[in-house]
Amino acid sequence: MPRPLAPRVTDLAPNAFSAMTVLAQQHGAVNLGQGFPDFPAPEFVLQAARDAFTTGWQQYASPRGWPRLQHAIAMTLEPNLGYLPDAVEEVTVTIGATQALHAALQTIVSAGDEVIILEPRFDSYSPQVRLCDGVPVPIALEVVDGRWVLDFDKLRAAITARTCAIILNTPHNPTGKVFTQAELEEIAALALEFDLWVIADEVYDRLSFEAPHISIASLPLMRERTVTIGSAGKIFSVTGWRIGWTVAPSGFSAALRAAHQWVPFCATVPVQEAVAVALELAQTNGYYASLNAQFKTARDYFVPVLERVGFKVLEPQGGYFIIASCDALTRDVLEFSRFLVTEIGVAAMPVPLFHDPETRHLALPALRFAFCKRMETLQAAATRLERLIR
């Protein structure tokens, strides 16, 4: 018999989002489970890719990133961050935001270190911490008067001598919460008091509808202890391009690159060039306003659909997901999500899957619906969901 495999791998569960997509395909369901757009990228983005793959550089780039893209990222983020990052020393291009998170955690976490994660959370956070031999410490967001809130007394109580970081996602997946200035200031105060890193996952920074998106790195003294993560896939609806980035202090970035260079070495160079051109053009062509309006329209269409068929909706302030409580429709949200796919023809993700197994009993009995779809797709889903009434 061969030697046993490493528990850090064998203990990881399969990705539930991919499984839901397969189930949706098997039953011909409208897939509102996995968060990817079903419409083409803007033409100016696609043209940038055509040009990059026909006339651009096709060989390796530096592990830190294609210089033109590093500068485009720095210029794009300057208004949010409140400072212009040093493109060469502080911006690193990664294989999507997922690998950016991996590199950041590899840089921060030693065996046994604790990382605070706000639940419900994006599915990769806890597994990524465990792959570093770290310990995820979940803190549940709570619903108060129809809004998601963070209990700061519980957050403070969760911090120990082994706590090294908190992962902050705003706008937040899956809840759609946009953290306020006051909330960010409280998180920043704790980070400063207890000497914590903040990993700021801001991949939905262009999709904040009513409240403005604020980067925690823009707050006093937070630039030096924040790793800001972004994603071209979310900005330009090209999730398969797998271009992400980190913006962090130069010393941290140098350490992060030491790990990053031994995993992918560098992201796909022609795609980096295409994203650089797209970011440059988006600064002046009105794209961000139209993107925001497009998703707000989709949200405002689909929220009433869900309410009409019996869900209680927590309206998202940002991102492109809706959390809809189904406690009036079922007692078993996991079984109900399967019923929706197989009998109604609509796929959505159960919110308990956005919690660690140990904390799923705290999860809201709800589903997450992705509305990053064509209006025709949402209308088809609406027609099928009407069957719940009948």
Image (cartoon, rainbow, N blue to C red):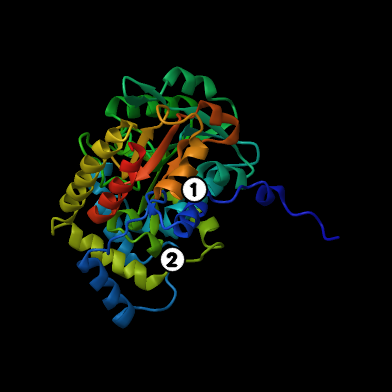
In the depicted view, which residue is nearer to us: 223 or 149? Answer: 149
Q: Indicate left or right for 382 with 359 as reference.
A: left
Instruction: Report the residue at 22% width, 34% height from top.
Output: 211
Mark count: 2
Say which residue label 2 marks.
Answer: 267
The residue at which mark 1 appears reads as 104
Q: Is residue 347 visible?
A: no
User: Residue placed at 42% from the left, 21% from the top?
Assistant: 151
Q: Is residue 225 visible?
A: yes
Q: Nearer the viewer, residue 254 or 312?
A: 312
The quarter of the displayed image where residue 187 is located: top left
Amino acid under disc 1: Ala
Q: Position of residue 137 (x, y in %)?
A: 55, 31
Q: Residue at x 13, y 58 (%)?
A: 284
The C terminus: image quadrant:
top left
Disc with the residue nearer the chain's start (2 vs 1) = 1
Q: Residue 189: horizontal and vertical position, in percent? A: 39, 25
Give the residue furthest to the top: 153
